[in-house]
Amino acid sequence: MRVSWGLDAAQLKAQKQVEVCLDTSQAINGHALLVGMSGVGKTFQLRKMIRQMTDSAAAANEPLPRFHVFDVHGDIDIPDASMVLFSEQTQWGMNPLRINPDPHYGGVRKRVQGFVSTINRVMRALGPKQEAALRNILQDVYAKHGFNQNEPSTWLIDETVGQLMSEGGDNRFYIDVPIDEKDDAKALGARWDGNLKSWFIPSGEYQGAITRWSPKMTARSHPSISDVLRMARNVLQQLFLGTGMKAITNLELANKAAAAYQRKLLEALRRGEKAFEDEKLQADLEKAKAKAVETFAEYANSIVTGRELESIMKYDSTEVLKSVVDRLENLDGIGIFKATPPPFDPHARVWRYNIKPLSMEERKLFVLFRLEELFLLAVQRGEQKNILDVLMLDEAHIYADDDPDNIMNTIAKEARKFGIAMICASQSPTHFPDDFIASVATKVVLGIDEMYWRSSATKMRLTEDALKWIRPKRSMLVQLKTHGETRNDWKWVVIPPDTVGS
């Protein structure tokens, strides 16, 4: 693929018109960094790159790349692009907990590590105990969804294969009972779960007459942030009370019965009735209390494996787990982490992610998780001769830092062989770490604010005189790193008048 930046200024002085072009077959990689203050034409250059890369790939009979444009300001209008708006009110989003099924690059451990690392990078970092608790919760949730770290065959979801329904940590075995047979199931000890809309029996009791109903199966799916939050809340309740979910449920029922009785009593007192009695409410309360006591005793008597306490104690303390629950509630409250994928047109070559409604922190979380997902998909696809995915980041400094585990740095160093090119636009090169700048094959300076001249000249190894020479939308500086070259000088490039704004 080719992109023409303009005409070589030195050759123009000699009355020669020589184009300065990016040729991805000659460049050491397809990555590019465009820097320039507001109004110098960064958005125009991004549009031009999309158009010229697509046209040149088609002319060379190469595969057409898919462009992923992360639009921070909502103003990168591209013809024929499939645009999707992301906000907490939209029904779609992204799932940062999707497992990559590749046996070498994927799995539960890597996804847990990637998730925790990104959370720590963008939000206030978790403490050691909080991080350990979150990892344990994530691993338990993945296990509940049928993912086993030691069995790569479980990392790939087969839509045709179901799994046993389970709420996790509550000793329940769900059964598939038709509505007209519910009384029979109830008589045999089955109970109704209003949350999951299914009948269940205690685990270990699926024998005898109850086996006339098959186990309840559900389609396998990747867990979501909501699943992790629900699990964390359940474990927190168990840790706080030192018991199981069945006992907690009955304790809640006893509290509700007591509250109902108390309301009736207060109403009677307000009416001047000093001798209030409600035999039904009193009976309901006593029954609920007895049931709660019974199930707490059942829980104690159900300890048989010796691992029941361990499964709770690995979460350290209620204070630690409560802080993890708070963090998960904040993530879930953002509203962009949803199981429904965004409705991009699969036939469109340009996917535009309009993330303008998101806050700065939300944008960073969204983009970093999406970049990681795209990179892992490319790795799973294998090594490629051509560029198949072009990632375009407007205001790319938002996502950059010097952490080697930052997915931007990983893509800059490793993604070339997997068919990925990353195009970053920002106002100054000083926002990016040295290793990132050194990894990018193409650098374009469109006009930098004077306050950044000295630091930019040092970082990009050019002169302040070169920066002074630039005229927005009329001239630029371009550096191209190509195979076989150890020294790559900056080209002073004149933008032909007939191409500006085209």
Image: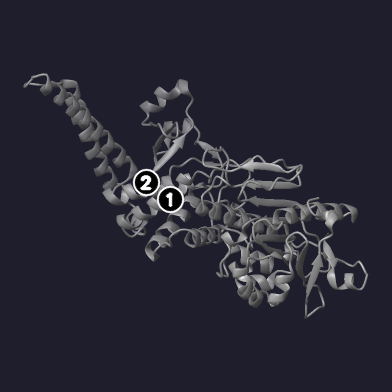
Where residue 425 appears, x then y in whole percent?
67, 60
Specify few, some or many for label 2: CA neighbours under 10 Å numbering under 14, 14-19, or 20 or more.
some
| Picture coordinates of residue 282, whole percent (x, y) | 16, 26
What residue is rendered at 73% in x and 74% in y? 466
Q: Which residue is mark 2?
A: 234
Q: Is residue 227 visible?
A: no
* Residue found 61% across the figure and 59% down from its top: 106
Q: Which residue is found at the position 73% from the left and 52% from the top? A: 67
List the residue tagged with mark 1: 328
In screen coordinates, is 171 left or right of 424? left
* Residue 454 vs residue 282, the one in the foreground: 454
Q: Amino acid at mark 1?
A: Leu
Q: SS at mark 2?
A: helix
Colour basis: one colour
Give the crowd class for mark 1: few <14, some 14-19, many >=20 residues within 10 Å.
Answer: some
Q: Is residue 138 left or right of residue 457?
A: left
Q: Is 416 placed left or right of 366 in the picture?
A: right
- The answer to whether marks 2 and 1 mark residues whose Cβ atoms lie closer than 8 Å is no
| Nearer to us: label 2 or label 1 | 1
Using the rendered view, name the quadrant where residue 149 is placed.
bottom right
Q: How many labels sit on residues?
A: 2
Residue 374 against residue 298 in the figure, above or below: below
| Residue in the foreground of this view, choosing between 93 and 256 | 93
Q: Amino acid at mark 2?
A: Asn
Q: Using the rendered image of the protein, determine whether residue 343 is visible from the camera's viewpoint.
A: yes
Q: Earlier in the sequence, mark 2 or mark 1?
A: 2
Q: Is residue 91 above or below residue 435?
A: above
